[in-house]
Structure formats: structure tokens, C-alpha cells
Image (spheres, rainbow, N blue to C red):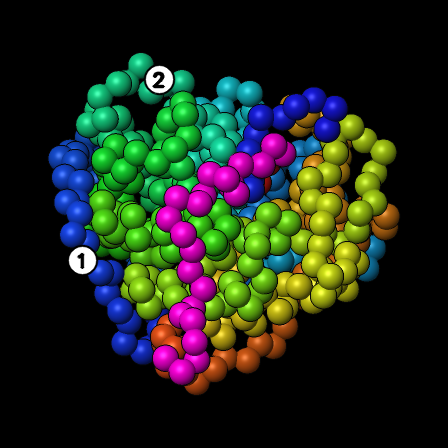
Amino acid sequence: MGVLIWIFLVSCRHVSETQIATPESSATPTAAILVTPTAAPAATAVPRQLPDFFKGVDLSYINEMEDCGAVYRVNGEAKDPFALFAGKGANLVRARLWHNPTWTSYSTLDDVQRTFLRALDAGMYTLLDIHYSDDWADPGQQRIPEAWQDIEDTAVLAQAVYDYTRTTLLTLNEAGLLPDFVQVGNETNGGLLKDVVGLDWPRDAQLFNAGIQAVRDVTAELGAGPKILLHVAQPENTGWWFREAAANGVTDFDVIGISYYPQWSRFSISQLGGQITYLRHTFGKDVMIVETAYPWTLEALPETAANILNQGVSQYGISPEGQKAFLVDLTQTVINNGGLGVIYWEPAWVSTSCETRWGQGSHWENATFFDFHNDNELLPAADFLDTPYTRPSRFPKGTRHESYGAALLSDAAGDSQGDAAHNIGPPG
């Protein structure tokens, strides 16, 4: 990209079969943090009936792109992107939230409200991705917000996490924008809120549980609230991570969220499917692919923002048709294994005259759903949203008969940091 970017990216349903509860650990769980509400609750929330499966789009860049002049077209006609995606079959919009990003006016709470209002007006559900940072949070960095830099006591930091999470949700509720899902952290392979990334479970468990408790308390106060999602980058890191989380008392959440980028994962789509089944039945949680992407070309516009995705999978190739085929196969595999949904990151981050901190344009134009050769005309990949998928009458149970040989794919403890750091930026 011309400069060394220290941004480390990888940045439905409740299954009817009997699920296996999270195993009791012989390790001593981390003690619960005693956090207390600091503000009166807002008006009660109205519960929403959720669909069995989500086909989603992360539109964290959409407001900025349109403010920079981006136009999205179908058959040459300009379209509102929220209406466009909803019309194609998307039913979920994900948006990231930074704590106090002084370097941008986007991914703030005001920006998230703008995004969620448009999503709800288009008839879609919403997922709030809280980074707990002023900047990108991912496997390579989880920087403490500037406002919390001087907090050294973990209990005090946990209270800050609790207060911030609770206040954020109550503010959204007051605006009629309470999300359907909330992520407590983004790609937290190495934990939360730290200068040196690496798991410290006695500390990290307190921080995760503070955020989780805030969501549960808001739900109790309002009579309805979001499902809680914990998010790890790449499926090969999920088994050991959630086993260690359970052993340290981090269990009160609803959904395991996964980033799955073939460029940085050793797992094929079919292996990912096996891992989804394993996770569902080992931990008793729903599983959602909250980030994925695939390039439709290796070409780029003449701009200074270098593209990030430059590898494909031989089975699909790199083409508009290959991008669509990858997403259709991925989505059908997630459905076949009882997963809750697939969210594409970020289909609308097209090139404009605006600049990132690393160059003018987009680092993702070759992985969007819009053809920069053709005035941002919609590409075939968006058809993955309205493809008629089949749903099995029964889902795999996550076990194999001993005659089948080895157990379902899992992973070794402690293998995250070697695979997760990428000297390129940014999703999330």
C-alpha cells in the first residue's frame, strides 16, 4: 500500500435436535464482576420475531461512501442501497461502532443510528458490532479507547465496559433502534482492551462478562433485547477459543460469530460446515458467519488505495460468476449444518474521490457487489441473497460413528496468534 499499515484485519435458527450443553470445566471460572446500572432505563422495547436464517450485509461504510458521491446502479438506474439489498433478499444489516474515533466522523453512534434507521425503514434486522476501541479492533490489535487509557484496575475497566454498553443500547432504544444482535467485541481472538494482544483469561473474562451483563440487564429492563454474539476470526480458531472461554466462565451468550475469509483460512467450505456442526453441539449456541468476502476481479482502479483481497479458491476462480458461486455454496453449506446466517463484508465499499488514512479510493472495490468498470452496476454476487436454498429436514448431530474414523474437524489450543495477524487492513 506504499506505507506499512499496522491494521491487522482479518480484518436459523435454534436447532430442533437436542443440543449438547457447554461442558462443565474443571478450571475455576473467573468471578463475576459486580457492575451496577448508572442510568434509569428507557421505555420498554417491543420483541421482534426473528427469522430462521439471516442473509446479511455489513454496511459500515455506506454513509461515508454516499457522502463521498458513490452511486449504486441496477440496469443503469441509481438505487438506494438499503432498498436494493432488501429487495434482493437481505434481511440483516451489520454496522460497526467505535468508541470515540477522532480521526473520522463515521462508525460513531450517530452514524450507526443513521444506518440502522435506513435498515429498519427497508424492513431489515440489525446487528451492532461494538469494537470497544477508537480504531479497528481485530486479532492483531484491541487498543483501549483513549478515554479509558488511564484505567489500570480490571474491575474499574469492566465497569466502564458495562456502563458504555448499557448506555449505548439504551440510547439506541430511545431512538427506536435497539439492535436485534450485539457483538461484545470484534474478532477477539486475543481478548479485549489491551496494548499487547494475547489472551489473559482472568482479565478478559471479566471484560467479556461485563459487556454481556450489560446487554442482559438492558433486556431485563426493557422486556426485550438483543441476542449476544462473541466473534472470532477464522473457523480454525473457534474450537479452542470457545473451550477456553467456557472454562473461564464466559458462557452467557447466544451466538458464535465467525469471520471466514478463504485468503486467510486453511478451511474449505465443507470443512467450515463440519466446524459449524461441531460448535453448535459442543457449546449449545447458534453459529453465524458474520464476515466473509471474495474478489470478483484482480483489476483495480488507478488510485492510491491498494486492494486487500488478491487470492481466490481454484474451485471458483476470480470472476463475477466465481464470486457468486462461492457465496451460494457457502450459504448452502451453512444452512445444511444448522448455521444461523451469512453476512457479507462490505459489498458497498466502492471507490470514490475520498481518502482513507492509507490512500485515495477503496481497498475493497474488487470485492464489492458493484462493477467499477460499469459505473457501479450491480454484480451477480448479490443474487446469493435471493437464491432458493434448500433446508434439510434434520441437521447433523456433530458426532460420528467410530467406524467413520477421526472426529469432526477441530483445532489445537493456542494456535490463534500465528494465523490471525495480517499486515493489511481493514475489515470488521
Residue 342 visible from this viewpoint: yes
Q: Which residue is mark 1?
A: 24
Residue shown at 29% from the left, 47% from the top: 245
Residue shown at 61% from the left, 77% from the top: 388
Asked if residue 419 lies left or right of residue 323, the reply is left
Q: Which quarter of the figure has residue 163?
A: top left
Q: Residues within 10 Å of mark 1 (few under 14, many from 20)?
A: few
Asked if residue 330 lies left or right of residue 216, the reply is right
Q: Residues within 10 Å of mark 2 (few under 14, many from 20)?
A: few
Residue in front for this viewpoint, 402 or 66: 402
Residue in front for this viewpoint, 366 or 7: 7
Say what secondary structure mark 1 lies in: loop
Tell me which segment is drawn in magenta: 402-424
Q: Which residue is mark 2?
A: 149
Q: Which quarter of the figure has residue 332?
A: bottom right
Residue 101: x %, y % from top left: 49, 24
Residue 98: x %, y % from top left: 46, 31
Residue in front for this viewpoint, 91 or 133: 133
Residue 185: x %, y % from top left: 39, 40
Q: Magenta residues: mostly which secondary structure?
A: loop
Residue 318: x %, y % from top left: 77, 56
Q: Is residue 156 magenta?
A: no
